[in-house]
Image (cartoon, rainbow, N blue to C red):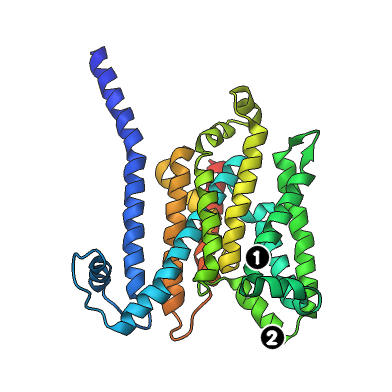
């Protein structure tokens, strides 16, 4: 009898361990499906089967039935947008999952460590003051001026918050959160001042950049994509030590985790991933908050599952949001940041009510 119970328990544990991997496979298939559908939706409608046949023709498996203008739409416009959206969604989802585990705060997101606000301040400075004070920078960077400024601003702000949070060679995570809130408030006031000084043309540029868009997908986004891919791979390697961080920082240290190094690596990698995302597409909110929560709801709190699942969910959300933004106001395009806010706002309310009910019980 005992042996039978033991065998049954072992089978259940194995099934429980395999379940998250089935979920990851399902999320990956959903991502492929949403990408194929997104390729065919827009002002020029193309069936999913025609898209598959077109790309299979490069492998000699079939013949493409698409006309020349359809091929140009897919290869020059939609495919670069989808690739950029996949990488951005995965980067934001991963960064949010890592920071929530690091801070042990379910409401943490990449903006908490100053990435988004620092990038926004740098871009506002270039748009409003560039012709007066940053002419040499504009001449040097040319079409890369805004992405370079956004990435540099995000890293500098994150470095400042990280430095202010250190005491006696140690980084206080709680202090890092508070410093992030304070620095974000100061940066927000500077952005408001520069926005007040901007003219109508500069205000229009600022408004559209702050709403986010994947329309800039192309050669100028390649450096950002490379940074996001490298940073995301590094973030995935932090899954095991972050599992121990959930027990508490002191407990993780006693179990042999180099807590200071992990905190430093997590902050730098998350800042690079999110900063590159903001540099490539502007401000896209809520993905870093929603994706980790959805991954925990469907597969548990183990970061070995949560991190890759958050990456896949974030990529899915961005692809779906970009598809909606392209078709909802044809022939114009709605900024993707508005779509993610429409999705993220109700989800945030639902999350708060769920937590409130748990505490009352």
Q: Is residue 195 visible?
A: no
Q: Residue furthest top?
A: 2
Residue ID for mark 1: 148
Other residues around mark 1 within 10 Å, as few (<14) / some (14–19) / many (≥20)? many
Q: Earlier in the sequence, mark 1 or mark 2?
A: 1
Residue ID for mark 2: 201
Say if 276 sits above or below 252 in the image. below
Which callout, 1 or 2, points to the residue nearer the camera? 1
Q: Quadrant of the N terminus?
A: top left
Other residues around mark 2 within 10 Å, as few (<14) / some (14–19) / many (≥20)? few
Query: With 350 as the anchor, is 198 left or right in this view?
Result: right
Q: Residue furthest front?
A: 140
Residue located 36% across and 75% down the image: 74
Say if 88 sits above or below 96 in the image. below
Residue located 27% across and 27% down the image: 11
Give SS at disc 2: helix
Give SS at disc 1: helix
Distance, label 1 to label 2, CA atoms, is 21 Å
Residue located 56% across and 61% down the image: 277
Q: Give how far across and how far down residue 356 sits, in percent.
A: 57, 48
Q: Give how far across and how far down residue 35 sits, in percent.
A: 36, 65
Query: With 15 as the anchor, is 348 left or right in this view?
Result: right
């Amino acid at each position: 009898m005992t042996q039978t119970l033991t065998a049954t328990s072992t089978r259940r544990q194995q099934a429980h361990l395999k379940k998250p991997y089935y979920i990851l496979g399902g999320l990956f298939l959903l991502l492929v499906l949403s990408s194929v559908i997104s390729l065919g939706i827009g002002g020029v409608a193309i069936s999913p089967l025609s898209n598959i046949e077109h790309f299979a023709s490069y492998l000699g498996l079939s013949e493409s039935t698409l006309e020349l203008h359809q091929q140009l739409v897919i290869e020059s416009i939609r495919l670069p947008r989808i690739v950029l959206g996949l990488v951005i969604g995965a980067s934001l989802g991963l960064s949010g999952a890592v920071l929530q585990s690091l801070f042990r705060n379910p409401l943490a997101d990449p903006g908490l460590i100053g990435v988004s606000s620092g990038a926004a301040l740098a871009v506002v400075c270039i748009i409003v003051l560039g012709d007066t004070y940053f002419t040499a920078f504009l001449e040097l960077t040319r079409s890369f001026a805004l992405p370079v400024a956004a990435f540099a601003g995000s890293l500098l702000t994150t470095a400042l918050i990280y430095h202010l949070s250190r005491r006696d060679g140690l980084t206080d995570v709680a202090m890092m959160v508070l410093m992030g809130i304070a620095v974000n408030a100061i940066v927000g006031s500077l952005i408001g001042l520069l926005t007040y000084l901007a003219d109508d043309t500069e205000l229009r540029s600022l408004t559209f950049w702050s709403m986010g868009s994947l329309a800039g997908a192309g050669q100028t986004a390649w450096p950002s994509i490379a940074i996001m891919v490298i940073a995301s791979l590094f973030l995935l390697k932090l899954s095991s030590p972050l599992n121990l961080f959930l027990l508490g920082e002191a407990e993780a240290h006693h179990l042999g985790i180099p807590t200071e190094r992990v905190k430093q690596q997590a902050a730098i990698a998350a800042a690079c991933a999110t900063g590159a995302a903001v540099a490539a597409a502007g401000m896209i909110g809520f993905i870093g908050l929603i994706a980790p929560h959805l991954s925990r709801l469907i597969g548990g709190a183990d970061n070995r599952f949560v991190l890759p699942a958050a990456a896949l969910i974030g990529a899915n959300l961005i692809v779906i949001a970009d598809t909606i933004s392209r078709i909802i106001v044809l022939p114009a395009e709605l900024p993707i940041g508005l779509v993610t806010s429409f999705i993220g706002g109700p989800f945030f309310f639902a999350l708060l009510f769920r937590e409130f009910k748990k505490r009352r019980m």
